[in-house]
Amino acid sequence: MPLLFRADDPKLDKPFCYFFINLLLIDIRTTLPTLLEKLNHPDYGELAARMTSALDIVGCFVAYLVEGMEGDDRGDEPPILPPDLILKLRKGFCETMSITIEYLRDRWDAAVAGAKGLHPDARVGAAETSMGSRLTLTWDSKTEGDIREGRPFISAVATVAFWIREDDNEALRMEAAGLLDMWMDLYQNSPTTTTNFEYRGLVIFALEGITASEEGIEAFLAHGGWATLSKDLISSFLATARLGDVSAALRGIDVVQILLRIVEEETAGTREEWMQLVKAVGDWDCPNAEYLDQPPKVQAFQADVLGLAAALFVNANDGMQRRFGRSASLIRVIAARLQVNQATQRAGGRYPPGVGGAYYDSFQDVIDTLEPFSKG
């Protein structure tokens, strides 16, 4: 990527990468709106391949740009772009992402929903054809297969998700919120069956941007976002008694941050259905000493989940606190048990300094938070 994106000649007012990315953005804006109407046209394969490549390169450029702006040490490499050119590109990016969101909306509706805004209950039943079972109101490609496995669709989802997480354009994030039915479906049905492509990380990227506003949170909740993410979170959490799945733990840490943001923004307090997460965490069969060899990221994930459960309980009304008081007591016991493991790690020197036992204080925070509710 440095060979493609860095400003190789600092004397140039506008380096090659500026013109290159700008050209790709223009190409996406002019071609993508015509892609759906050519879905079963002979030229579709060539156009789809070009759009896939353009979106992939644009997405890589955004990632490279973010790394540079976050202070990534690039040694003697020149800066990617001066600030004034980045601002000029940002306008083109926002326009391009808006068109890409429109494409995703139309492509998803054509392949899955049957018509824009059509509720799933209003769709007719599946028709059995030589190509398998299909909804009769859909309009899809004869050759591309499942939309979730189509390369232009995957590239568009990835680029939009990453951009709206990094850019604070509220209007664009609200446009992305209009795709919440798609985001939730992709999350629930990930990884895909044949290509094993994992969408959940991309959906989390998108939700980090969408839930940054009150309107985005409302849209997230209206489309069953809490139920979808909390179900995956609980499943990953309970599995850590047996498995040290670092990838699931990293995803879970991000999910906790999204859900915790929603809990903190809910002025009316914890909702009844959210308390099922508290009960599920309290019912966890926490291991003892054999748990010491779990990867640090898995331990961090558990500390975050316990913290989320404690926040949910504390923000609940008195009636729910009485009903779920036993779960809160069990969570406190779990935190204490894991804290003992952390203390053992510190004393035994099982990990390098700053790694082993690093979450001792996190578990103590959970214990202290729930301690007033355990008296009597």
Image (cartoon, helix red, strand yellow):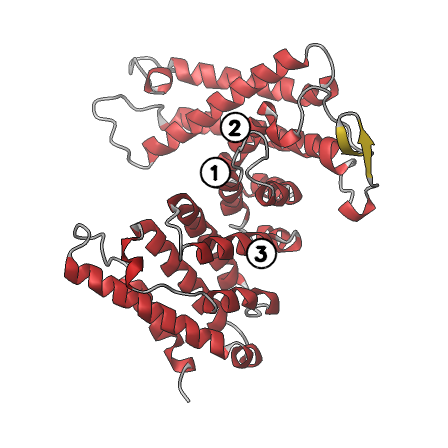
Quadrant occupied by the N terminus: top left
Name the kind of residue labelled 3 in the image.
Answer: Trp
The residue that appears at 52% across and 28% down in the rendered structure is 93
Could you tell which of marks 2 and 3 lies nearer the N-terminus?
Answer: 2
Residue under circle 2?
93
User: Is the C-beta separation of discs 2 and 3 under 8 Å?
Assistant: no
User: Is the C-beta separation of discs 1 and 3 under 8 Å?
Assistant: no
Label 1 – label 3 distance at C-alpha: 24 Å
Mark 1 Cα-neighbour bin, 10 Å: few <14, some 14–19, many ≥20: some
Residue 106 in the image: state x and y as whole percent.
71, 31
Task: Describe the element under mark 3 as helix, strand or loop.
Answer: helix
Q: Nearer the viewer, residue 160 or 172?
A: 160
Could you tell which of marks 2 and 1 lies nearer the N-terminus?
Answer: 2
Q: Is residue 131 above or below residue 198?
A: above
Q: Is residue 59 above or below residue 357?
A: above
Name the kind of residue labelled 1 in the image.
Answer: Asp
Q: Is residue 42 above or below residue 150?
A: above
Residue under circle 1?
167
Could you tell which of marks 1 and 3 lies nearer the N-terminus?
Answer: 1
Label 2 – label 3 distance at C-alpha: 30 Å
Query: Does residue 181 appear to the left or right of 208 in the view shown?
Result: right
The total of numbered circles placed on residues is 3
Task: Describe the element under mark 2 as helix, strand or loop.
Answer: helix
> Which mark identifies residue 226?
3
Q: Nearer the viewer, residue 5 or 351?
A: 351
Mark 3 Cα-neighbour bin, 10 Å: few <14, some 14–19, many ≥20: some
Label 2 – label 1 distance at C-alpha: 10 Å
The residue that appears at 25% across and 62% down in the rendered structure is 342
Residue 209 in the image: state x and y as whole percent.
51, 44
Q: Is residue 89 above or below residue 310?
A: above
Residue 353 in the image: state x and y as whole percent.
16, 52
The residue that appears at 21% across and 63% down in the rendered structure is 344
